[in-house]
Image (tube, rainbow, N blue to C red):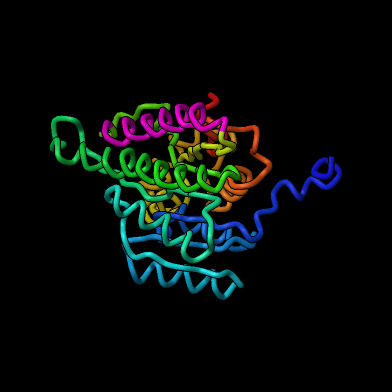
Amino acid sequence: MSTISNPFEMFDVKGKTALITGASGAFGMVAARVLSGAGCNLVLVAGNQDALDEIAQECRDAGSDVTTVNKRPTDEVACAKMVQVAVDAYDALDILVVASGMNKVALINDMEPETFTSVMDVNVTQSWLLARAASAQMKKQGNGGKIVLVSSARGLLGHPAGYTAYCASKAAVDGITKALGCELGPTGITVNAIAPTVFRSPLTQWMFEDDEKAKTVRAGFLARVPKGRLGEPEDLSGPLLFLASKASDFYTGHILYADGGYTAG
């Protein structure tokens, strides 16, 4: 009854330990800032040392205890070591946010098979390996846990401009999310995914500009977005905190579309 009389307690993650991969990317930085602000201990993982140092220092300045790992989750050993870093530094791992990912765009007859498999490896296999390593530690702790993967509206909807690899990879992430939600349900570990559409990032900044190309592309896209605007990083903050906190304890195996209604129409 206490969480009902004081609902803010459901979102309290203070003192929890969160491992965030892709921490130097657009969504990874959102996750770092949100969970830092909420009082988590952070293990930030990224391949870009300079960008990693920058977001880590920002979180430290905000009062967080931060440990960094300058690696990518390329294989089973690397993923296991990332989890172990969290345990060595903070004695537990409570939250995993897999914000690392890749997109390579080309029409199918212009895309090399190696490009397709590289996108699948980064978006699918590495998500699976991280969830595997984190869930093993969470089960050992016996207190449940939170696993948050990153999908996309493209996991549900196709795209004509050469997205076979990306769409396939995000559909696979959706499948992992649903299957692990079922598999890990009895352990108290929840597994969910956030699926945004276009939100402001270095890769999409051009769509927010005022030149004719941006205006034309934006107008065509927004015709299908009921909210009538492109996404901002802050739009992912609430869904992330929900999925990382006790508030989502009865919510697992789901894809949360943070897309302004794009997939509803």
From where the camera sits, is residue 262 visible?
no
Q: Quadrant of the N terminus?
A: top right
How far across and how far down the image is residue 124, in percent?
33, 38
How far across and how far down the image is residue 69, in percent?
38, 64
Please provide the residue range marked out in magenta. Answer: 164-186
- 69 w.r.t. 188: above or below: below
How far across and how far down the image is residue 215, in percent?
43, 45
Image point (33%, 69%), residue name: 49
Q: Nearer the viewer, residue 240 or 106?
A: 240
Q: Which of 122 and 147 is in front in this view?
A: 147
Q: How many labels does the image show?
A: 0
Q: Main secondary structure of the magenta part?
A: helix
Q: From the viewer's perspective, is 163 left or right of 237?
A: left
How far across and how far down the image is residue 226, in percent?
58, 32
Q: Quadrant of residue 198?
A: top left
Image point (35%, 47%), residue name: 101
Image point (46%, 55%), residue name: 20
**Is residue 166 rendered magenta in the image?**
yes
Q: Which of 232 and 246 is in front in this view?
A: 246
